[in-house]
Amino acid sequence: MDSAMFHTLLLIQLIATGFMTGLIWFVQVVHYPLFARVGAGQFVDYEDQHTRRTTLVVAPVMIIEALAALALLLLAPAGGLRTLAWLGALLLLVIWISTAAVQVPCHRRLARGFEPLVAHRLSGTNWIRTVAWSLRSLVAAAMLIRAVPALVG
């Protein structure tokens, strides 16, 4: 792979990860705390619409991010870039496992009706993804800066 294609791949990763980082911070600070204010009568419909619409936004970006991370694992040259690619991939694995094992089950329970303890668990455990995506953004930026020294010169 030529350097321009590799740099494009790094940029795609940074954009996808940056998008997800911004989105997860919005969800963590604004969206999840407002769940309790929806009202019991409207909550089931609200949660259904929330999960559908959120999936439409995040699924394509998460897939692009995962494909970029996988490609970088395979294509990053030995040394610092490969180490950063592995660190980024491990953070992404944490995000996907947390999503599948914790946040999705919470949303499934909330789809039956608002439960304050479940909503609290969702918001509390979502910090795993918020921190992991924030760290991934730093890793993605570091990879691009390391690969393209002219960016910092």
Image (cartoon, rainbow, N blue to C red):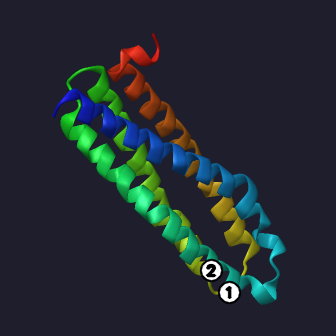
Q: Residue at x 24, y 44 (%)?
A: 71
Q: Which residue is mark 2?
A: 49
Q: Residue at x 43, y 49 (%)?
A: 94
Q: Is residue 10 visible?
A: yes
> Which quarter of the rendering shows the N terminus?
top left
Q: How many marks?
A: 2
Q: Are marks 1 and 2 in contact (CB under 8 Å)?
A: yes
Q: Which residue is mark 1?
A: 45
| Residue at mark 1 to residue at mark 2: CA–CA distance | 6 Å
Q: Residue at x 64, y 64 (%)?
A: 122
- Residue at 55%, 77% in the rendered image: 52
Residue 85 is situated, as x and y percent measured from the top left of the image, at: 32, 34
User: Does residue 113 appear anywhere in the picture?
Assistant: no
Q: Secondary structure at mark 2?
A: helix
Q: Identify the amino acid type marked 1.
A: Asp
Location of residue 76 with respect to 41 vertically, above or below: above
Looking at this rendering, what residue extends furthest in the bottom direction? 41
Q: Which mark is residue 56?
A: none
Using residue 20 as the reference point, say whether residue 28 is left or right of it.
right
| Pick the front one: 71 or 128 | 71
